[in-house]
Image: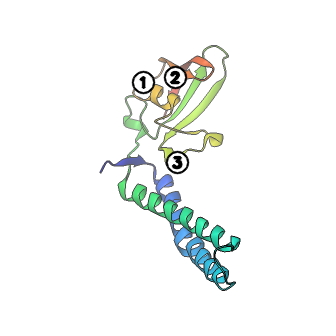
């Protein structure tokens, strides 16, 4: 069983979602199924079938989260001792072609929030930054072609 590096925030978010699914969503869908069953014939009971499908999605998500949480390991991140970009680092980069400056925090796929600059360390940008240092230029293969990013800083 491989461990999955995560930040404490990501682990907390997954645990919160799991708790909500178990304490709220699961309980509600069971009640919805019971209510739909009480309506009679299940063969043509759309509410019953919709509730059963929702229950399946909830149970699948619960299993996924339980597995991810069990395999998660909070990755240590000490900016003072970082010799290069690593998991958990916040990296400031400049697009060599456009001059645009961006900041990314490298997180696990479960912690991704691209709108807030949190990208997966397994994404094309994340993979290109891991192990690199300040001043290095990395090439990222994107749908639009190769993009060159200069690492300005990381912490």
Q: In this view of the protein, which residue sits in the foreground, 95 or 143? A: 143
Q: Is residue 42 above or below residue 143?
A: below
* Residue depicted at 55% across the width and 68% down the height: 21
> Is residue 7 in sight in this rendering?
yes
**Whole-Å distance between the Cαs marked 1 and 3?**
22 Å
Counting from the top left corner in percent of width and height, residue 154 is at 49, 31
**Which residue, given by chain and number where applicable, does mark 2 sit on?**
151
Q: In this view of the protein, which residue sits in the foreground, 126 or 144? A: 144
Q: Is residue 80 above or below residue 33?
A: above
Bin the neighbour count of mark 2 within 10 Å (Cα to Cα): few under 14, some 14-19, many 20 and up.
many
Look at the numbered disc 1 and give the secondary structure of its residue. loop
Mark 1 or mark 3, earlier in chain:
3
Mark 1 or mark 2, earlier in chain:
1
Bin the neighbour count of mark 1 within 10 Å (Cα to Cα): few under 14, some 14-19, many 20 and up.
some
Look at the numbered disc 2 and give the secondary structure of its residue. strand
Marks 3, 2: nearer the viewer: 3
Quarter residue 146 falls in: top right
Counting from the top left corner in percent of width and height, residue 11 is at 46, 56
C-beta proximity under 8 Å, tags 1 and 2: yes
Q: Which mark is residue 132?
A: 1
Counting from the top left corner in percent of width and height, residue 152 is at 54, 23
Q: Is residue 153 left or right of residue 34?
A: left
Bin the neighbour count of mark 3 within 10 Å (Cα to Cα): few under 14, some 14-19, many 20 and up.
some
**Which residue, given by chain and number where applicable, does mark 3 sit on?**
111
């Amino acid at each position: 069983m491989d461990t999955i590096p995560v930040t404490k925030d990501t682990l907390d978010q997954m645990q919160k979602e799991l708790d909500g699914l178990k304490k709220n969503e699961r309980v509600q869908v069971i009640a919805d199924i019971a209510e739909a069953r009480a309506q009679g014939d299940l063969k043509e009971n759309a509410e019953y079938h919709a509730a059963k499908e929702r229950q399946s999605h909830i149970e699948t998500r619960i299993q996924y989260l339980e597995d991810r949480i069990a395999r998660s390991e909070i990755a240590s991140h000490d900016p003072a001792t970082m010799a290069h970009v690593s998991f958990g680092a916040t990296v400031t980069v400049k697009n060599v072609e456009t001059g645009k400056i961006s900041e990314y925090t490298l997180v696990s796929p479960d912690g991704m929030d691209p709108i807030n600059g949190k990208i997966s360390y397994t994404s094309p940008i994340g993979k290109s930054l891991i192990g690199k240092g300040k001043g290095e230029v990395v090439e990222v293969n994107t749908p639009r072609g190769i993009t060159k990013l200069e690492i300005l800083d990381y912490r």
